[in-house]
Amino acid sequence: MVHLRSPSHRRARKLPAPEDWKSRPLGRSLPPVTGFPLKILTTVLNSVFGTKILIPNAYKNSNGDLLRKIVIPEDPTMYPIMPFDGPSIPLGSKTSTDLADLTRPRSRSPDDFHHWEVADFIQAYTSETMTPTEVAERAIRAIQDSDRRKPPLRAIIQYNVEEIRKMAAASTERYRNNSPLSPLDGVPVCIKEELAVVPYYHRSGTDCLGCDAPSTVDSTVVAKLREAGAVILGVANMHELGMGVTGCNPNKLHGTARNPYNPQHFTGGSSSGSASAVGAGICPIAIGTDAGGSVRIPSALCGVVGLKGTFGRVSDHGGKLPDTPCECASLLHVGPIAASVRDAAIAFALTAGPDPKYPHGLNQPIINLENLDNTNLTGIRVGVDWRYLRHSSNCIVAACEKTIEHLENCGANIVDVQIPELEEARIAHTCIVVMEMAAAMAESFSKQYDKLTLPSRGLLAMRDTVPAFDYIQAMKQRTRTMNFLKEIFNKVDVIITPGTGILAPRTNPGELTYGKAPDEKDSALMRYMFLGNLAGIPAVTVPIGYSSNNNLPMSLQVQAGWWQEGVMLRVAHAVEKGTKHAKPQVHFSLLG
């Protein structure tokens, strides 16, 4: 259902009572469990009693069996690949997108904090104010200093000083010869540990997998960044196996990455170290992966920009652990976490495109980022499902409503939409995550059970909970959800929601030592994420302000139709231009 209404109509709308909501993608409230109780719970869950009685009952009580109760006539969609009209990107081609507008330095208010962006690094290098080698030395010191803090930041957990210096020296020579390879030449970046990076261990947040030998072949996205001349600082921390949205990782080789805006709060996950590094200024761009918000959630909580393109846009080759199937293959996206919308767009343009080793993205349309800097949104239709939007913390709702007023002032038409069957879509996403993760991790789980963290053992105990019938029903629901979204995107250009339903949760010692079982906070963090992964539509989170009592970031999410990253990023850039940014507690300046 879609209809246009005036701004005054929106401001007069009242929040419907919860019982009047047709879709409530919350699930049931779950109590927090950590420490010794978590150990007991994990043991019970992996016993016969747990797998046969406790988990099935919990799954049913959390509405997990919803799809068993309904008839879904649509055929299943195994991968959310959407056909398109127009020319395709030729296999093996470099980006044809003109990035010149995105690399021009922009004027800023002197009293408004800003992270250094790609354009600032380019200006420093071309003006010979600084060299990539000098910036790399500052980045090395920032990594080292960040882990000498109390508590340590634990953003970048594997790095090699000589490798960094070698890449920076090569970039410095290219600038000296006036021959940089791309806008990212000499720009520091880091990569989530889930992706293979030479010469680092590909551990995916564990202390036991991928630890026998370092990677000898880069993942595709890393190879593209090397070809672009980026200086890869190292490998970033993550939630173990990507199986969580807080970033809590008690493993000895990792520790929990800290939120640069307040180190006593979680970063979000699972791309926790990537978002922490960008938020702290250690690099302007990092790469993460996202099967249920794992790029967008930590970006939202760490006050930076998180982007996942349309399913298939960016190859995830090199993202799976050795000798295992790809985890969550029909949900997974690779995408940038960045200091700004423009930086996210640059990284996206340089890493997207067809890859012979990744079949799901072989056929994709040309990327169009023209007009991204134009904040006049006249004619752009912005869809808002008000019931869904207001299912978040009061401060986040208020910040979103203020941002919507800003978009109206930029000329956008605000359109009421209702997204059907949100709860069904949430359950479908959960079923697919459980089934695909369990299939990928079956052998590793049986061999490495005692070496995995307690939360991972507990979640993997669900491996036999979801029957094949539920999985097929979930794929059918994916078809329905994609059809619903097609109808909505025929009438609006983008849909906006909060980035997360709550602010960054506070850490406690038990969680940092033992990990934590998923609870209602995890559900609130994921509340607006699942549509993007289930249906494969592009999405970006962008900061819109900070909480008044503890200065924690709040974020808005912009989602568009398949392959429409350009209009999505244009709206996100307008949002960004209307936001005053605050400096994090932990911050390193590579250029200042």
Image (spheres, helix red, strand yellow):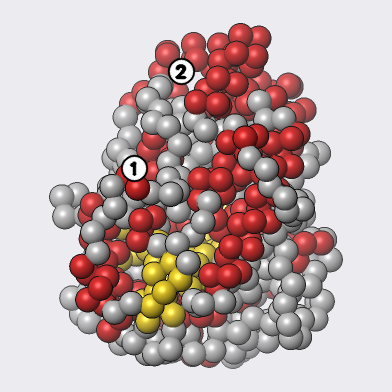
Left or right of 339 in this view: 322:
right
Compare residues 350 and 198 and report the one nearer the observer: 350
Between circles 1 and 2, the one closer to the viewer is 1
Kindly identify which residue carries mark 2. 38
The location of residue 317, given as percent across then percent down, is 75, 56
Compare residues 504 and 414 and report the one nearer the observer: 414
Sequence-first disc among 1 and 2: 1
Left or right of 305 in this view: 86:
right
Q: Amino acid at mark 1?
A: Glu
Kindly identify which residue carries mark 1. 19
Residue at figure coordinates x 56%, y 27% from the top left = 59
Q: Residues within 10 Å of mark 1 (few under 14, many from 20)?
A: few
The location of residue 378, given as percent across then percent down, is 39, 90
Q: Indicate the secondary structure of the residue bearing disc 1.
A: helix
Q: Residues within 10 Å of mark 2 (few under 14, many from 20)?
A: many
Residue 377 sits above or below residue 514 on the image: below
Residue at figure coordinates x 72%, y 50% from the top left = 73
Whether tag 1 and tag 2 are in contact, CB under 8 A, the answer is: no
Separation of residues labelled 1 and 2 (CA atoms): 33 Å
Q: Amino acid at mark 2?
A: Leu
